[in-house]
Image (cartoon, rainbow, N blue to C red):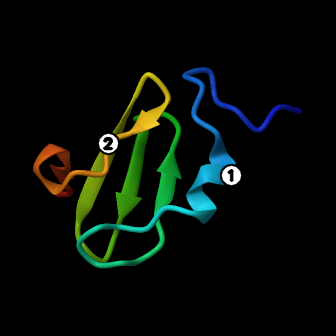
Amino acid sequence: MSEKTPAGFDRRMLEALICPQSHATLEYDAAAQELISKPAGLAFPIRNGIPIMLIDEARVLD
């Protein structure tokens, strides 16, 4: 079984990434291709397999 998603995002990268606002760990949402920071209430997009970790690019969670 591969550790990569269809979009090419390497799930092992999650171990190195943290939320730039809350400094919390992130959850991977494969369906939405986003990294979720529940403490900050933000979802960071993954585009072409690259996580966009800019607060200005994040979607606010409902």
Residue at the far right: name it: 1
* Location of residue 15 by image quarter: bottom right
**Total marks in image:** 2
Task: Indicate left or right for 16 with 46 as reference.
Answer: right
Q: Is residue 42 left or right of residue 38?
A: left
User: Which amino acid does the dot numbered 2 rest on?
Assistant: Ile
Q: Amino acid at mark 1?
A: Arg
**Residue at 50% in and 29% down:** 49
Question: In the rendering, at what x and y percent does residue 57 appear?
Answer: 16, 44
Compare marks 1 and 2 and give the one earlier in the sequence. 1
Task: Please name the residue that numbered disc 2 is placed on.
Answer: 52
Q: Which residue is mark 1?
A: 12
Residue at 76 percent across and 38 percent down: it is 3
Measured from the top left, where is residue 44 in percent x and y? 30, 48
Looking at the image, is 52 positioned above or below residue 9? below
Q: Do the numbered discs 1 and 2 sit on residues whose CB atoms are within 8 Å?
A: no
Element carrying mark 2: loop
Which class describes the residues within 10 Å of circle 1: few (<14), some (14-19), or many (20+)?
Answer: few
Question: Is residue 11 positioned above or below 42 on the image?
Answer: above
Residue 2 location (% of width, % of height): 82, 32
Q: Residues within 10 Å of mark 2 (few under 14, many from 20)?
A: some
Q: Quadrant of the C terminus?
A: bottom left
In the rendered view, tell whether residue 49 sits above or below residue 34: above
Q: Secondary structure at mark 1?
A: helix
Between the residue at mark 1 and the residue at mark 2, the CA separation in whole angstroms equals 16 Å
Question: In the visual, does 51 lie left or right of 55?
Answer: right
- Residue 42 location (% of width, % of height): 24, 59
- Residue at 20% x, 57% y is 61
Q: At 23% across and 67% down in the image, what residue appears?
A: 41
